[in-house]
Amino acid sequence: VANTVASSGSGALAGLARFIGAAWFAQVLFLVVVLGGTLALFKIPVRRFVHFAREPFLIAFATTSSAAALPQTLENMQRFGVPKRILGVIAPLSLSLNLNGSTIHLAMATLFVAQAADLHLSFQQQLFILLTLKLTSKGVAGVPRANFVILAALFEGYGLPMEGLAMLLGVDALIDPVRTSVNVVSHCISPAAIARWEGAQFRDDLEP
């Protein structure tokens, strides 16, 4: 942040503040609309799910690590009612492949830097960037700041200024908690949805 202010002036902080707000809004919107809609679609009891997903969510928010929340995810989802045979396969796969929060952040960060650099990207370019990020974001959960490695390669390929990475690095700590938490909620929903697909039934009451 100090480097950004020194090079671009304090006015750059206003743009970064709007980016932080937009990033949080996008993650919360995805959490409520898409992931909440998935619970409704598969008829998973929302109140009971929130009760068991709350602890992994808070661990991810505090540690900004999906891997740190995995043991609690496995334990709580088993108590929620997901069969162990499904949980043992789907949850680890989701940790590497189902990174919704990270993909949303990578896409927003790329478009933010493009706008800051006044670089126009066509709709086809934006679509290709999103598809590329969807593929290259796989496996970043266990590597701290791996998002910047992906962005560095993408920026070079599309002629985006590498200085944008320094700006993003200054505010990443403010976005990482919610990004990681959305990832972990996705890891909780995936085995529950597959279990419902396989015919599992979940109780509506909460455990004491």
Image (spheres, helix red, strand yellow):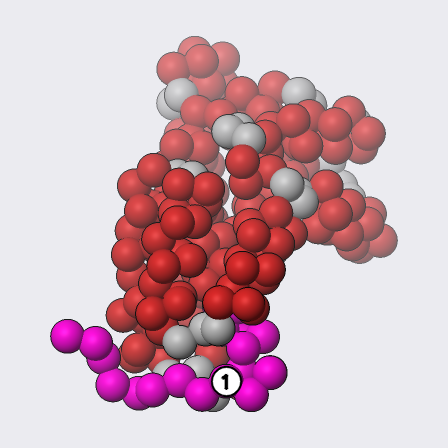
Residue 110, x across and y down, in percent: 65, 39
Image vertical order of residue 41 relative to residue 188, above or below: below
Image quarter of residue 206:
bottom left
Image quarter of residue 177:
top left
Q: Is residue 110 left or right of residue 11?
A: right
Q: Quadrant of the C terminus?
A: bottom left
Residue 116, x across and y down, in percent: 60, 33
Q: Is residue 183 left or right of residue 129?
A: left
Tell me if residue 199 is in the magenta stretch.
yes
The answer to whether residue 160 is seen in the rendering is no
Of all residues, the one furthest to the front in this rendering is 85
Q: Residue at x 30, y 78 (%)?
A: 48
Which amino acid, by three-letter code, is at mark 1? Ala
Residue 60, x across and y down, in percent: 37, 46
Q: Residue at x 77, y 25 (%)?
A: 156
Q: Residue at x 77, y 52 (%)?
A: 131
Q: What residue is shown with label 1?
A: 200
Image quarter of residue 81:
bottom left
For disc 1, the neighbor class at 10 Å (few under 14, some 14 to 19, many from 20) is: few
The answer to whether residue 110 is seen in the rendering is yes
Which of 143 and 73 lies nearest the eye of the viewer? 73
Of all residues, the one furthest to the left in this rendering is 208
Q: Which residues are magenta?
A: 189-208
Image vertical order of residue 166 relative to residue 86, above or below: above
Q: Residue at x 43, y 49 (%)?
A: 70
Q: Is residue 87 left or right of residue 61?
A: right
